[in-house]
Image: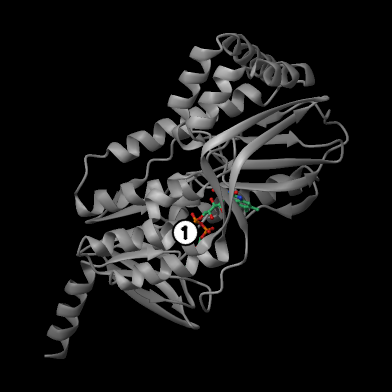
């Protein structure tokens, strides 16, 4: 009898959606999935809901995404940008003001919304790993010092930039250490090592100053990759100064957000999937968009349009970043000079969260910016080849 009850409970639980990480992207996803009628449980490693304060700037899209619960986290509204460079300046007035929000107020509002939608929250519960089982996915957690096993049909990894869900479910991990720059390494040179025994990818060393550089590797298994990096540093006598765990993920390419695992699915949202606009490092609005898309996929609603739009958005920001990454003073001066009345009008009307539309409109109204952009891309391309 007990075995039957246990089995029934397991079967019921296997329909559950487990969200790992109770912060912005995770709580947003939890509310959306719960509103669609699924059982949702959020696992959060922190002991209670005490988010670290962080002042953030977001576009007006934030209000559309959150509705009424957005209000309580808004501290201020920004109506104008002033750009300065080399004695020049330009102003851009915003038709729809940007919002200054406080993370320590946003997270509790999102948690309340998730709970009211029916999601259950488990604090002091650290995700350890996952594996496929007969019905879906078995999830190992440390719950207040006790190891437990949970079962779910879908797992959503919303556990931030150093996502353990991404690593254990097989997404390629990226490990990076800040190191003392070796004496024989010129500050203007990036080094790449191919060591196929360690990784099918490569190691890289990017000097950030004459003293320091970032040495990283992409691997196939999280723990092994970290060990490989340690060995690599030791063998070459390179001294690690700090390990980069809690970092802002740098969007370099689209991270697929879904993986099939046995009979279940694992998804990634927010920083865990590098859903950050790399030109501005804004991750709140894009993380919500990623969470919305994943919720639609779990509930089998929508047509995947949100995901396509997000991918286009992140890629445009990546292109912008690449274009401006090697800008010199004269390029910035030219940029500010080229911001004529027509381009300023576009910048004031279209937000950074509609970057493709923004970019095309700006270029249409000020074609000389195309040449400046091409110059930026060429500078980047040449410096990468050097
Ligand atoms: C200094 C700074 C300034 C920023 N400024 C802006 C800005 O102005 N505008 C903007 O839009 N964005 C900004 N960002 C980016 C933005 O804050 C992030 O993109 C966003 O907060 C990411 O949310 P997330 O929910 O994906 O991840 P996180 O907020 O990192 O949440 C991850 C959650 O998972 C939990 N967790 C981790 N591991 C486990 C585990 N094993 N088990 C259970 N739980 C786990 C963590 O405790 C945490 O609660 C800034 C970031 C930084 C660092």
Q: Front-most of 258 and 121?
A: 121
State whether residue 304 is above or below residue 247.
Answer: above
* Secondary element at image label 1: helix
Q: Residue at x 52, y 47 (%)?
A: 283
Q: Residue at x 78, y 37 (%)?
A: 208
Residue 306 lies left or right of residue 214; in this view the side is left
Whether label 1 lies within 8 Å of ligand 1 gets the answer: yes
User: Which x, y percent locates residue 87?
Assistant: 83, 25
User: Which x, y percent locates residue 353?
Assistant: 47, 37
Q: Front-most of 24 and 57?
A: 57
State whether residue 384 is above or below residue 241.
Answer: above
* Quadrant containing the C terminus in the rendered view: top right
**Residue 268 seen in render:** no
Q: Which residue is mark 1?
A: 24
Q: Quarter of the image holding residue 158?
A: bottom left
User: Which x, y percent locates residue 33?
Assistant: 27, 60
Quadrant observed for ligand 1 in the rendered image: bottom right
State whether residue 66 is above or below residue 44.
Answer: above
User: Which x, y percent locates residue 299?
Assistant: 21, 54
**Residue 215 seen in render:** yes
């Amino acid at each position: 009898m007990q075995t039957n009850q246990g089995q029934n409970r397991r079967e019921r639980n296997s329909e559950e959606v487990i969200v790992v990480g109770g912060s912005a992207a995770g709580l947003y996803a939890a509310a959306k999935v719960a509103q669609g009628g699924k059982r949702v449980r959020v696992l959060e490693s922190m002991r209670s809901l005490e988010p670290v304060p962080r002042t953030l700037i977001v576009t007006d899209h934030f209000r559309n995404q959150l509705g009424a619960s957005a209000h309580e986290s808004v501290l201020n509204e920004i109506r104008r940008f002033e750009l300065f460079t080399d004695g020049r300046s330009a102003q851009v007035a915003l038709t729809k003001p940007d919002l200054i929000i406080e993370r320590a107020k946003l997270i509790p509002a999102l948690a309340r919304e998730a709970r009211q939608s029916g999601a259950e929250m488990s604090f002091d519960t650290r995700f350890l790993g996952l594996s496929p089982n007969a019905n879906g996915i078995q999830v190992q957690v440390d719950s207040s010092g006790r190891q437990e096993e949970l079962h779910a049909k879908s797992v959503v990894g919303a556990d931030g930039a150093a996502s353990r869900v991404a690593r254990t479910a097989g997404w390629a991990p990226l490990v990076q250490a800040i190191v003392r720059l070796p004496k024989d390494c010129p500050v203007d040179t990036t080094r790449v090592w191919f060591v196929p025994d360690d990784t099918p990818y490569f190691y890289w060393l990017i000097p950030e100053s004459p003293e320091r550089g970032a040495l990283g590797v992409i691997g196939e298994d999280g723990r092994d990759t970290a060990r490989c990096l340690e060995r690599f540093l030791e063998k070459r006598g390179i001294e690690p100064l700090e390990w980069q765990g809690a970092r802002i993920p740098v969007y370099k390419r689209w991270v697929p957000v879904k993986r099939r695992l046995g009979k279940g699915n694992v998804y990634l949202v927010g920083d865990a999937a590098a859903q950050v606009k790399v030109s501005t490092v804004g991750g709140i609005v894009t993380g919500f968009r990623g969470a919305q898309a994943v919720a639609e996929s779990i509930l089998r609603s929508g047509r995947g349009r949100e995901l396509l739009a997000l991918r286009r958005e992140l890629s445009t920001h990546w292109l912008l970043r690449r274009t401006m990454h090697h800008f010199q003073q004269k390029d910035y001066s030219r940029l500010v000079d080229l911001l004529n009345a027509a381009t300023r009008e576009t910048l004031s009307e279209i937000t950074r969260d509609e970057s493709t539309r923004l970019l095309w409109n700006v270029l249409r109204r000020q074609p000389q910016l195309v040449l400046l952009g091409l110059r930026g891309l060429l500078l980047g391309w040449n410096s990468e080849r050097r």
